[in-house]
Image (cartoon, helix red, strand yellow):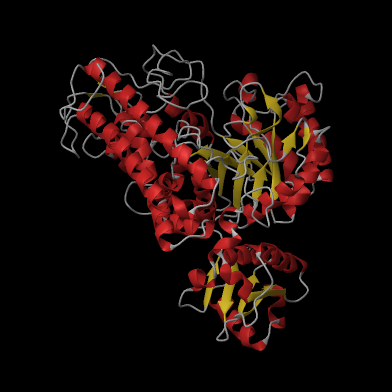
Amino acid sequence: MISTAPFATSSPMWLEPATKPWLNSYTPRAVGGEELAARAAADWRRLAPGAPAAGGAGELLITTLEHLCELPDALRGAARDAVTSEPLDSEGYAVVRDVAGDLVVVGADGAGALYGTLRLLTLGPEAMLGDSDAVTSGPDLPLRMVDHWDNLVPHPVMGTVERGYAGDSVFFEGGGLAPDTERIDDYGLLLASLGINAVCLNNVNVHATEATLLTERLDLVRTIAARLRRRHIITFIAVDFAAPMTLGGLGTCDPLDASVQQWWRETTERVYGAVPDLGGYVVKADSEGRPGPFDYGRNHADGANLLAAALAPHGGVVMWRCFVYNHRQDWRDRTRDRARAAYDHFMPLDGRFADNVLLQIKHGPLDFQVREPVSPLLLGLRETRVALELQIAQEYTGHAWDTYFLPSAWREVLDLDVAGDHGTDLGQDLAGRSGSAIVAVAGVGRDWNWVGNTFSQANLYGYGRLAWDLHAGTQTIAREWAAASFAGDARLHAALARILLASREAYENYTAPLGVGFMVTPGDHYGPSIDGYEYSPWGTYHFADRDGVGVDRTPTGSGYTEQYPPALAARYRSLEECPERLLLFFHHLRYDQVLPRCGVSLIQRIYDTHFQGVEQVRAMRREWEAVRGQVPEPVRADIDRRWRAQERNAVEWRDQVCTYFLRHSGIPDAAGRTVYP
């Protein structure tokens, strides 16, 4: 284990002091006696590796708009000019430099002062300001959230963090609080450096012990919320829709039943008595065996509005997940399509949800696959608040063993033109709609590097950057993360950025061909199992036979394409216009079908991409080996073993997928490469 001050038991990630020698050039000072600005200054001192050097550049002043007039003359005028030309909204900040080299961070409020200070600390004044004397910034969305799928006691299959690949829960242990509570403080500081302002503590699959966070274990929520509050992070909890029965002893949890409504009102009032600034509840209902309003013949507006009414007097919101589908499907029925489910369930209810309900919608219609189209529900809902849900935990993208830079995938989601007319993109649409939010499922744990694979730190960093700025570029994110996290030269940083930017295409090439999903080992979802879900009631099929592969989701099949706006629907149903990487998501094609973009047959494209993916992994590994000497042990050794594992995994994926399709099609690889018959 490495110990790097100031996080004695964990990696400081992009706050790594060794990458910031300029820290000792500035003396931080809060201006105006503002307590929250003083905390931001204290965080700067905590992360600086030593006392300010003599003859340094000067002071770093940290303040809020309320105390702008108390700045020294030289900085006051420049700061006032900056916030006048670009007024600060809530949580926004300005960073200003005067001719003497002194710096000031002006927050719109205490949160803005903290975010601006930590952003400056992460990048450094030269990278942040460049040739400019001032920069202002504010978040595109008011709610930027991380969902933890943590269990208070180990689940017999999932452990203490469901879909987590980095050790036990940061928050919980044995039904109580985790012993290292200072790690919670460290985590809050890391999230604040990204502008994350909300955390849901527990698993959306609310088991019996976790359900008691509402009642007998409410003190746990109070304790954790108090620690996160110092970093301007509000706390949510996931609740069991059946809690009136399992905790309250009622005979029903019918959302229209008066006793159920009263139970939620009274319980929520007690919760807010303990945690007055609780953000609200996260709910998974009628999904994968969870109870919900369907049990009583009610709809999801009825269910969400029940909790919204209880939360409204306290300013809380309901994050109601739209991951609702029939997981008891018959694979024989080709008309059933799990991809349709969210739109079919929720679109007819648009406008019927309370104002403090946000429908939390996965970015794709299935389940965080390597390649999916954007969920049409995100595009269709116009009268309901929505939250875009992403996944930082790499459930289907390598389990934090294989390197996969998720911001490359998220950038495509946010760049989609919502009407298919090359006009407004999804990022602009979300930012322009009142009360929208962004949420990501994280698998952060107690491993020294927080996330399992050091390269996976870039996914947490990238999520925070995109949550704040929905149009942040992936190249910028990759370069920032590398430079802020590793104390090496420009050659190291450039190589790390190139690896990240190549990783998504490589993983997709050696795993999922052209939009096919779920060819993974059932249960843990790691490694190839081509037919693993093909006859499963979970409803995730690829329909490969001797003639072809893919799912017909056009009007001749499930009709899923018609859930999109007309221009997008036309694009997806057309073989010529459909993006090649989504062809098998939307179409069932013969193996000898010549693909319009690449000019080779489908089967040859499958062979080519899988062999290419392995070579891309080897190229990324060579990039790493050329610069690995700049990375200290044992980080270097851990990354080494993960590259060895990824190369083995890529070869196994390639060989199994290529052999599977050779056996089905009987068509050999035209390039004559080894495919096992």
x and y, in percent, of residue 502 in the image: 36, 46
Q: In this view, does 59 lie to the left or right of 360?
A: right
Query: What percent of the width, then of the height, locates residue 668?
Result: 18, 22
Quarter of the image containing the N terminus? top right
Instruction: Confirm whether residue 202 shows in the render.
Output: yes
- Residue 151 placement (x, y as % from top left): 69, 31
The answer to whether any part of residue 277 appears in the image is no
Q: Quadrant of the C terminus?
A: top left
Residue 544 point in image, percent of width and height: 30, 18
Q: Residue sitting at 69 percent across and 42 percent down?
A: 236
Residue nearest the observer in this picture, 588 or 177: 177
Q: Is residue 674 left or right of residue 282?
A: left
Where is residue 177, by image quadrant? top right
| Residue at x 55%, y 86% (from the top left corner) | 99
Answer with the quarter of the image where residue 571 lies: top left
Q: How many labels does the image show?
A: 0
Q: In which quarter of the image is residue 490?
A: bottom left
